Amino acid sequence: MALEIIRIPVLSDNYVWLVHEPESKETMVVDPAVADPVLAEAQSRGWTITQIWNTHWHPDHTGGNAAIKAATGCKITGPEAEKERIPTLDVMVKEGDAVRLGSVTAAVLDVPAHTAGHIAFHVGDEQAIFVGDTLFAMGCGRLFEGTAAQMYDNMQKLGQLPGETMVYCAHEYTQANGEYALVAEPDNLALKERMDAVLIARAKGEATIPTTIALEAATNPFMRANSAEQLAERREAKDNF
C-alpha cells in the first residue's frame, strides 16, 4: 500500500483519518471533527497537511476544517450537494468525479441517506474507501435526511466493491452495532464469532476499525438486508434498541 493511514480518535467516539502519500509527501485529513489533535499528529510525523476531504456536513466531521486550513493553507474538498452547509469548501465534487492525493486517485461515490449529499471516497488502487457515516462495522448511518431505499442502494453499491477493500468509517460504534446485529440475525455464526473478537478488543481499549467489505457482507444486518423494506425495519429497530 502506498498510503499511510493513521487513525486519530477524537471526541467521544469519532475517528479522523490522517492519510499520507509518501511519494509526493502530500497529507490529507478525512472528516476532521477538531483541529488540534490532527495538527499535532501530523507535526509529530513531520507531515504537512495539504488537503481535507469531507464526506458530509455534520459538525463532528467538519468542525476542524477552518482551523486546519488557517494553520496549513490546505485545500478542502467535499460534497457539491452540501456546499451551502460547509462554507470552508474549496472544491465541490459528486459521483463521477475523482480527487487526487499525490499519485493516488479516489473516485467519488454518492451515498445519500444519512445526509442528503453524503459522499464516499473510493481509492481503488489502494483497496480503501472512506465512508463517513454511511457504512459502519455491523451498522449503517441513521436516516436523518434520506430514505431506507437510498441506504439500501448504498449498501448494494458498497457491497459490490472487492471484498478485501478496507472500510474507514468515522465512529467506534462496533460493539453497540453488534449487540443489535445479534438480535437481527441470531443464527449468524460469523456474526457471533466477530462479536466475541470485538468484545475482547474493546475490553483492551483497542479500535475495531477499519473493517472490510467482506466482513460486512458476512455480518452487517444492513448490508445483508434483502430489501429496502427490511433495511427500514432493521433501522427502526436499531434506533429503538
Image (cartoon, helix red, strand yellow):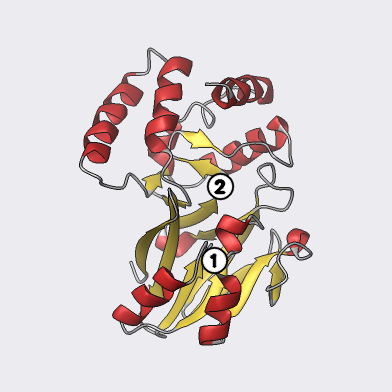
Q: Residue at x 40, y 69 (%)?
A: 37
- CB under 8 Å between discs 2 and 1: no
Q: Which residue is mark 2?
A: 133
Q: Residue at x 48, y 70 (%)?
A: 29
Mark 2 or 1, nearer chain start: 1
156 up-or-down from 180: above or below? below
Quarter containing the N terminus: bottom left
158 up-or-down from 109: above or below? above
- Mark 2: which amino acid? Asp
Instruction: From the viewer's side, name the closer residue of 241 and 177.
Output: 241
37 up-or-down from 117: above or below? below
Q: Residue at x 31, y 22 (%)?
A: 192
- Binning the other alpha carbons within 10 Å of mark 1 as few (below 14), some (14 to 19) or many (20 upward) gives many
- Mark 1: which amino acid? Ala
In the figure, residue 240 lies in which quadrant? Answer: top right
- Badge 2 element: loop
Q: Is residue 42 visible?
A: yes
Q: Residue at x 60, y 42 (%)?
A: 157
Instruction: From the viewer's side, name the closer residue of 95 and 137.
Output: 137
Instruction: From the viewer's side, name the closer residue of 202 and 217.
Output: 202
Label at residue 152 = none
Q: Report the Cα–Cα distance between label 2 and label 1.
A: 18 Å
In the figure, residue 65 lies in which quadrant? Answer: bottom right
- Badge 1 element: strand
Q: Which label sits in the foreground, 2 or 1?
A: 2
Relative horizontal placement of residue 7, taking residue 32 as reference (left or right): left
Residue 241 locus on image (x, y percent): 52, 21
Residue 170 locus on image (x, y percent): 48, 52
- Binning the other alpha carbons within 10 Å of mark 2 as few (below 14), some (14 to 19) or many (20 upward) gives many
Label at residue 106 = 1
Residue 104 locus on image (x, y percent): 47, 73
Relative horizontal placement of residue 142, taking residue 38 as reference (left or right): right
